[in-house]
Amino acid sequence: MADGIQTKRTTIYDLAALAGTSASAVSAVLNGNWKKRRISEKLAERIRRIADEQGYAVNMQASALRRERSRIVGMIVPMYDNRYFGSIVEKFEQMARDRGLFPIITCTQRDPDLEVQAARAMLSYQVEFIVATGATDPDHISDICRAAGIRSFNLDLPGTKAPSVLSDNFGGARTLTRQVLQRNRDRFARNEPLVFVGGRAVDNNTAERIRGFRAAHADMEIAVREDCIIACGYAAQKAEQALTHLYQTVPDHPHGMFVNSTISLEGVLRWIKKEQPDLLQTAAIGCFDFDPLVDLLSENILMVKQDVPTMLDALWRIIAENNTTHEVVEIPPVAAVS
């Protein structure tokens, strides 16, 4: 070493000598497979500490070339801006590591070009599979993966060329809508339809939630107001602007609402604070998603929680089965909070 700069790159054989163990044990610890090798926690910690001290990092691409499997897996997510996608990422990482896999996760901002770039970058790292979560064009990602000989899976939004796991959006929306309509009827003597706000009408989840929204109104013999179904996108600002426009242009508007995500709910609550501060004392609203802080604001905000653990259990089951069909698995959301 000269001038404090290390000239010889540390190898796993150097780490093995320093740790007093075998190179294969060092490799197993650094690749996350040490528990399967029955290596002790104490030895694993010593190896990791020495690796850190020596500035050693696993060359994942080189390791993949030496093995039939890279043990690297990829996940694409659209946003990190709500608890739902955050919980998917956190749980997926945990479950991947429990299986001795190294997860690479990237956020693509609901941009189809970024999704394709991310998929191709992951393939360059020889990932074993890619999970496209809430992708705008999951079939394109499936095509790219198939051309590379890699499996792909869809989560949250379905595709037609790979297995898909998502919430039962129709059933969850139908149940939530019925609960809000019933709350408005029983507590506020309102026998009127709800405003639907948020989401994109072109995506499967919003379309299915609107279908459930309509079915619940039919169940309770209440006519849906077509001018009050506002699929304005998920952004909070768009929900706020949509409600401002509705109240300015539709004087006989309904008061209760079905809000299509916690992101949209942020805009709805901002609008309520500015324009209708007493609304939650005169009508209930429902949100298809869950945030525990919202539950503290008002008992008249009802929510459903998408069952992320069960969704990911189903995803890993399909992965383990080496399933090549294009099945769609729908997981019921957790019952609404009241």
Image (cartoon, grey):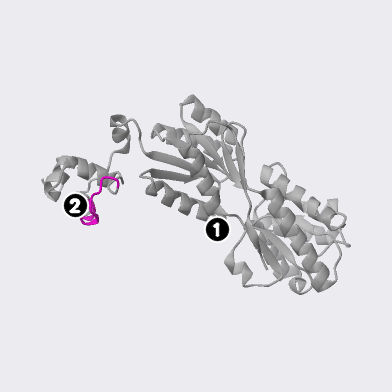
Q: Residue 312, image x and y in percent?
A: 51, 48
The quarter of the picture where residue 65 lies is: top left
Q: Is residue 129 left or right of residue 249?
A: left
Residue under the image location 51 percent in, 55 percent down? 87
Q: Residue 273, image x and y in percent?
A: 70, 70
Chain part drawn in magenta: 36-48
Residue under the image location 51 percent in, 35 percent down? 152
Task: Tell me how far mark 1 sits from mark 2, CA to CA.
Answer: 37 Å
Residue type of the residue flagged with mark 1: Arg
Question: Which residue is denoted by mark 1 in the rendering?
Answer: 83
Q: Is residue 127 above or below residue 335?
A: above
Q: Is residue 44 magenta?
A: yes
First-in-chain label (1 vs 2): 2
Residue under the image location 35 percent in, 45 percent down? 100
Residue under the image location 85 percent in, 71 percent down? 189
Q: Which quadrant: the C terminus?
A: bottom right
* 47 or 198, nearer to the observer: 47
Residues packed near mark 1 inside 10 Å, few (<14), some (14 to 19) or many (20 plus): some
Residue type of the residue flagged with mark 2: Ile
Which mark identifies residue 50?
A: 2
Q: Residue 294, image x and y in percent?
A: 62, 67
Residues packed near mark 2 inside 10 Å, few (<14), some (14 to 19) or many (20 plus): some
Q: Secondary structure at mark 2?
A: helix
